[in-house]
Amino acid sequence: MNILYRENVVNGIAEEKAPFVVSTMPEVWQIVKDEIGGSPQEVIFVESMERSYLETVENSIPKVDFVFGIGGGSAIDFAKYIAWKRKLPLTTVPSIVSVDAPVTKEVAIRESGKVRYIGNVMPEVILVDFSLIKKAPKRLNRAGIGDVISIHTALFDWKLAYQRGRERYDEVIARKAKELIDSLKESIYEIREVTNEGIKSLMELFVQANTLCWKFGNSRPEEGSEHFFAYNMEYLTKKHFIHGELVCLGVIIMSYFQENNLEEIFEIIEKAGALYRPADIGTNWNEVLECLLTLEDYAINESLPYSIINEVEKNRIAENLDALQKIIEKESSSLRGKR
């Protein structure tokens, strides 16, 4: 995977790429449109990742020879979709590092509000422009820890499924994935402040995590009940969340249910400055409770891998969630006192 890190990398990137199409977002396009060095055949402002919308827009795009994805996860996934469907070369320029979409082969789409992964495409190059990423609110970039800290709960679920005879397991890959949590901890303050080093650290962690997934053959090393929680929340509420923040909440909840070192994981998320409290990320505890009560059925209906949610007692979920809320308030107050 070819990743180029530097300041002002967008300058002139399209000078020799014609005709081309750009998948982006209005606010990002305003920043880069006069710098890329070329005029696209079409600029797509991504409104949805529903399959029907993707198909309609892709069919309307004129013939082009190259695709640029410039923006957040949806803009990049849309560009990946076009490149995959038309077998075209692709360059991605993330404007935030809130999700690992720039380094994954699959495209995360929605069908009737449910997440589906399709396709197999990689960009020729990923251009990481430090100056562009720093223009985004720090909140968005801090959220990127979600797709790394998820390894913590995903590994527990994976081992649990193996112990129950549900799937194969790879000790070497699991150990290497766990080491990425240690690397995250070492870079946590750089990530919080969105420094060049923090941005690069997150991108490299995304790459390493996804490389382990490719080696194993699926996303088991970094995706478990915390992601299933996020998928069900989106499906139930029909809301668009910042992916990493919702996953961070899922990691905290599932660490509690797993009895899996909640205090340390909570401290990492707090130190990174990532948001996770329901009121801060666009939801509430009642919606969280509904999500948890329906999560096992959702996972079964979606044929998701076995995880802790298959073993949680439904009649105790409300009680446990109430206890977790109290822990969160106590722990966050304690951490604020240490700063």
Image: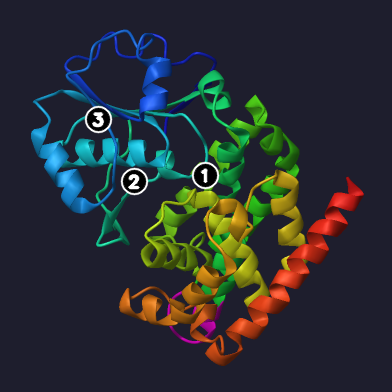
Q: Is residue 326 above or below residue 10?
A: below
Judged from the image, the secondary structure of the residue bearing numbered disc 3 is strand
For residue 206, which numbered disc appears in the image? 1
Side (left or right) of 66 relative to 157: left
Q: Does the magenta stretch include residue 164?
A: yes
Would you call the spot at circle 1 few (<14 residues within 10 Å), some (14-19), or many (20 or more)?
A: many
Spatial separation of the CA atoms under disc 2 and disc 1? 12 Å
Three-letter code, disc 3: Ile
Q: Looking at the image, do the residues carrying marks 1 and 3 touch, with CB atoms under 8 Å apart?
A: no
Q: What is the crowding at mark 2: few (fewer than 14 residues within 10 Å), some, or many (at least 20)?
A: some
The amino acid sitting under disc 2 is: Lys
Q: What residue type is labelled 1?
A: Phe
**Which quarter of the image is occupied by the N terminus?**
top left
Please tell me the numbered disc located at residue 51.
none
Q: Name the residue: 74% across, 43% down.
A: 186
Decide which of tag 2 and tag 1 comes sooner along the chain. 2
Quadrant of the rendered structure where residue 144 is? top right
Residue 260 in view: no
Residue at 67% in and 74% down: 256
Is residue 162 highlighted in magenta?
A: yes
Over which residues does the magenta segment extend?
160-168
Label 2 sits on residue:
105
Q: Which of marks 2 and 3 is in front?
A: 3
Residue at the far right: name it: 338
**Which residue is labeled 3 in the image?**
44
239 and 308: which is toward the camera: 239
